[in-house]
Amino acid sequence: MDGGDLLAGLHPGGLSSFSHRDFLGPARDRPFAATGRPRRIELSDNDCVPACCGGVFVTVRRQDDRVVWSSWENTHDSRAPLPGALHFDAARYDGELARAAADHTWERTVDTTARLLLRAIEDSGWSERWGCVLEGVAPVQYDPLDSAGPPTVEVDFRLPGGGRGSYELPVAPHISVEEQVRAFTERVMAGDPHEAAC
C-alpha cells in the first residue's frame, strides 16, 4: 500500500491466501472483486487453516464510485494494530485488478501450460459434450529437490450424477508449452471422462 507491504506488517511470515490462478476466471469471481455486497476476504494465512493458526481478513465492498476495504481482522495476532478503512477510486481499482490478472511474466512452464489448457478446454465444448462441469485446471509444482516427480497440470471436473474425475498431465521441460497444450487438449477431448472418475 503506497509502495509498502501492508501484510508484512500485519502478519510477518504469513503466506498469501491466493495464487495467480485465482485471477484467471471472470472478473466478478476474482478474489478482490468489489460489488455492492460486502465480502470477507482472507488475505494471508500460516500455510494452515485459519481456524487453527489464524490469518488476516478484510471486508471489501463497492460504494458508489469507491471501493472500500474495512473491518480488518488479524486472528493470528490480536495485538497487531489494524489499518482503518481504505478507500480506492473504483475505476482505478478495477483497472489494477485487470492489469494484475493479465500479467503472466511470473509464470513457470507449468503455470502457463495450465492457463492455456484451461482456455483450450473451455473453448472446445468438452463440458457440453459430456455434461461435465469443469472445476479447475491447476498447476502442481513439486519441490525440485523432492523425488515426487515432474510438475503436473491437474484437470478436475464433476460428472453428471455427482461423481468426480481428474486428469493428471505431467509437464515436460524440453517440450514447448504450445505443443504440450495441444497434446493435453487432444488427450482430454479423446477420452471418456467417466473412465477418469474417482
Image: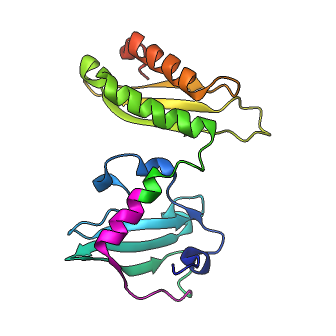
Q: How is the image coloured?
A: rainbow
x and y, in percent, of residue 137 in the image: 45, 35
Of the 4 image quadrants, the one containing the C terminus is top left
**Which residue is pictured at 43% across the width and 58% down the height?**
99
Where does the magenta region start and end?
A: 80-98
Q: Is residue 142 above or below residue 128?
A: below
Residue 149 in the figure: left or right of residue 122: right
**Which residue is pictured at 38% across the width and 26% down the height?**
121
**Dividing the picture into quarters, in which one does residue 193 lie?**
top left
x and y, in percent, of residue 122 in the image: 34, 30
| Number of numbered markers | 0
Q: Is residue 159 visible?
A: no
Q: Foreground residue, 103 or 77?
A: 103
- Magenta stretch encompasses residue 86: yes
- Magenta stretch encompasses residue 153: no
x and y, in percent, of residue 8 in the image: 61, 75
Q: Is residue 169 above or below residue 44?
A: above
Q: Foreground residue, 144 or 25?
A: 25
Q: Is residue 123 visible?
A: yes
